[in-house]
Amino acid sequence: MSNSLSKEEAKSKIDKYASDILRPMQSHGGLELWIILLALGLVMYVFAYFIQLRDGLGVTAMRDYVSWGLYISNFVFFVAVSLVGMLISAVLGLLKQDWVKPLTRVAEIVALGFVMVSGLVIVNDMGRPDRLLNVFIYGRIQSPIVWDITVITTYITISLLLFYLPLIPDLAFAKKRLKNMPTWQYHLFNILSLGWMGTPEQYKILHKGIRILAVLIVPVALAIHTVTSWLFAATLRPGWDTTIFGPYFVAGAFVAGAAAVVILMYVLRVNYKLKDYFTDFHFNKMGQLLVLVSLLYAYFNLNEFLVPAYKMRSAEATHLNMLFTGKYAVLFWGVQLFGMVIPIIMMIFKKFRSPGWLTLISVFILVGAWLKRFLIVIPTLLHPYLPIQNVPEEFHMYFPTWIEVFVTLGSFVLALGIITALLKVFPVIPIWEMAEEDGITEEYENND
C-alpha cells in the first residue's frame, strides 16, 4: 500500500474505481436506441450484399478501369484505424508514458473492432466470395494478397492477446464486485480470469507477457499497413508508383487511429461520467500526440505531391491536374485543409486541445482520413496509361451506387457493434493498473 494512503483511504479509492469503471457494464443509458440504429444498419447491409451476391459486382459502379472502388478505400481506412492499438498500448507503453494507462483498453477495443472487420471488407469486394478458401489453399508467397492476409491474421491474434492479458485481473475483480451480472457473464469471467489470485508470481508473469506482446505487435502492425501500401506501390500507375507509400500509410494510420480514440474517449467520458479518468490532461496529451503524428503525415503528403509536381511527367501531370484543378479538386483541397492543415494549426494552441474542441477536430480528421483513402484509390484508377476509349460513358467516371454505400456503411456498423459489445461486457479502463500505480494492489485483490 502507498505510504501516502491509509488502509481506509485505499479501500475507498478501490470502491470508487469499482463504482465508476464498472458502471458502463451495468448502465443502459441510450443503449437501446443505439442498438436499434445498429440493427437497422445491419439489415440494410445484409439486403444490399444479398443483391450484390445474387446479381454480381455489376450492381456496383466498379468497371474495367475503376476495379477498386469504395470497398478497397474502406479496407485501407479500417486497417489504418486499427494501428492505434499498437501506437498507444505498445509504443507509448514501452516508452513508459504512464498517462496512457487509462486509454490502453479503449485503444485496443478500437483496434479490434476495425481490424476484425477489415477482412470482411475485402470479401465485400469479391465477386466470388465462395472461392476465398483458395487463397489459403493455393496462395503463393509471391502474392502481396497472401502477405496481407498473413499479417492481418497475426495482428488480430496479437491484438486479442494484448487486450485479454491485462484484462485477467479485472475479470476476477469484476466477478466479485458485480453482484447482479447475468449468469452467462459470470461464467465467462470465471473462465477467462483463469483462477487469478493476484499473487506476486502471477503479476510478474502478467507484466512479462504484456511486455513481450507489446514488443511483438510493433513490427507486425508496421507490416500490416506497409504490405497494404505495397498492394498499390507495386504497380506502375501514376499516383501509386512511389517508394514512400509504406511509411506514408503508417503515418496516416496513426493520425486516423488517434482521432478515433479521442472520439470514443469523449463518448465514454460524457455518457458514462468517466471525467475523472479521461481528464482534460489526457485530452491535452492526445492532442499533442495528434499534432506530432499529423505533422509527420503532412511531411509525407508534401513528398507525395511535390516531387511528381516538380517533374510533371505526362501521366503524373494528368493525374495531378485532376486533383489540383480538375473534378476532384474541391474534395482534394477540402481534405488537405479541413482534414489536416487547419486541425494542426488549431491543435497547436492548448485551448483547442480541450475535450470538446479536440473531439470536434478529431471528427474532421477522421472524415478527412477516410476521404483521403478514396482520393488515393479512385483518381489513380481513372488514369491508366492507355486512354479510356470505345467503352460506355459511365466507364469514364466513378460514383458509388447505393449498393456500395449500404455495404460500406454495414462494415462500419459491424465495427461499431464489436466496439459496443466489448465496452458493455468488459471494464473500459484497466482497474488493476490504476490501483497498482497508486500502490494499493493488496486492497484491490482483497476487496469484495
Image (cartoon, rainbow, N blue to C red):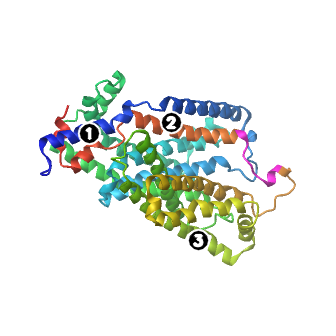
Q: Amino acid at mark 2?
A: Gly
Whether the residues at callouts 3 and 2 have beta carbons within 8 Å, the answer is no
Which residue is disc 3 drawn over?
Answer: 302
Give the image location of residue 205, x and y in percent. Answer: 22, 46
Q: Secondary structure at mark 2?
A: helix
Q: Name the quadrant of the C terminus.
A: top left
Work out whether 83 lies above or below 8.
Answer: below
User: Alpha carbon of mark 3 to alpha carbon of mark 2: how far?
Assistant: 36 Å
Q: Residue at x 62, y 60 (%)?
A: 335
Q: Amino acid at mark 3?
A: Leu
Q: From the viewer's perspective, is the residue at label 1 or at label 2 nearer?
A: 1
Quadrant in the picture for residue 312? bottom right
Which residue is disc 1 drawn over?
Answer: 16
Whether the residues at callouts 1 and 3 have beta carbons within 8 Å, the answer is no
Give the image location of residue 119, x and y in percent. Answer: 54, 43
Residue at far right of view: 390
Crowd rating for badge 1 (residues with CA inside 10 Å; few <14, some 14–19, many 20+): few
Q: Residue at x 20, y 39 (%)?
A: 12
Give the image location of residue 309, x and y in percent. Answer: 67, 74
Crowd rating for badge 2 (residues with CA inside 10 Å; few <14, some 14–19, many 20+): some
Which residue is disc 2 drawn over?
Answer: 417
Q: Amino acid at mark 1?
A: Lys
Quadrant in the picture for residue 157? top left
Q: Secondary structure at mark 3?
A: helix
Which region of the structure is painted magenta?
Answer: 394-402
Whether the residues at callouts 1 and 2 have beta carbons within 8 Å, the answer is no
Q: Residue at x 65, y 61 (%)?
A: 334
Q: Earlier in the sequence, mark 1 or mark 2?
A: 1
Work out whether 126 lies above or below 189.
Answer: below
The mark found on residue 132 in the picture is: none
